[in-house]
Image (tube, helix red, strand yellow):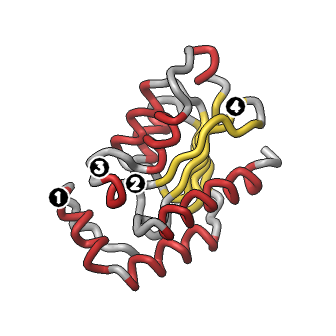
Amino acid sequence: MTNDSYFMKEALKEAKKSLTEGGLPIGAVLVKDDEIISRGRNRLIQNGSAVLHAEMDAIENAGRLNYEDYIKCTLYTTLSPCPMCSGAVILYNIPRVVIGENTTLMGAEGLLKCNGVEVVVLNDLECRDLFLKFVCNNSEIWDSELEKVGNTTEVK
């Protein structure tokens, strides 16, 4: 799709908003028929939430859509989605996920693909650099978030 870069820039805007709020710089937008229908950003820290990843926030902010709407959507996310977020994509039959980058942290892309979801990775350097800079400057915060989910994966 020719608009992938445009919509990823919009997801990046959400990641930057999260960062200015003191949160993890991960953003997402949900797009239907080439129009953004919702935006989301990681709000774990800001809201003291256990589940408000950017993808979950975008899906929640879209409201309760019907099946016909979800199957026309693409979810754009700056970072490879975790198993929880991938599960929500599968549950709501979102057929396409566009990922800004997956070199710093690989999510559950295999789960998405095994369930028929088209996965596109843009290898966007701005997504990568924003996340790496945050991890380098806030290693205690990032390590704390990983410990909460029992993940000891290091960022590459």
Q: Residues within 10 Å of mark 4 (few under 14, many from 20)?
A: some
Which residue is the site of mark 1?
A: 150
Which is nearer the eye, 152 or 78?
78
**Secondary structure under badge 3?**
loop
Disc 1 marks which amino acid?
A: Gly
Which is nearer the eye, 47 or 143?
47
Which is nearer the eye, 142 or 101?
142
Q: Is residue 36 above or below residue 23?
A: above
Which residue is the site of mark 3?
A: 49
Is 116 on the left-hand or right-hand side of 3?
left
Q: Residue at left 55%, top 77%?
A: 129
**Secondary structure under badge 2?**
loop
Q: Earlier in the sequence, mark 3 or mark 1?
A: 3
Of badges 1 and 4, nearer the viewer stands: 4
Q: How far is disc 2 from disc 4 in space, using C-alphas?
A: 23 Å
Which residue is the site of mark 4?
A: 32
| Residue 52: x %, y % from top left | 37, 46
Disc 2 marks which amino acid?
A: Arg
Q: How far is disc 4 from disc 3 in space, using C-alphas?
A: 27 Å
Q: How far is disc 3 from disc 1 in space, using C-alphas?
A: 16 Å
Q: Residues within 10 Å of mark 1 (few under 14, many from 20)?
A: few
Q: Are marks 2 and 3 in contact (CB under 8 Å)?
A: yes
Q: Is residue 88 above or below residue 100?
A: above
Q: Earlier in the sequence, mark 2 or mark 4?
A: 4
| Residue 95: x %, y % from top left | 59, 30
Q: Residues within 10 Å of mark 3 (few under 14, many from 20)?
A: few
| Residue 28: x %, y % from top left | 56, 50
Question: Which image quadrant is residue 119 in?
Answer: top right
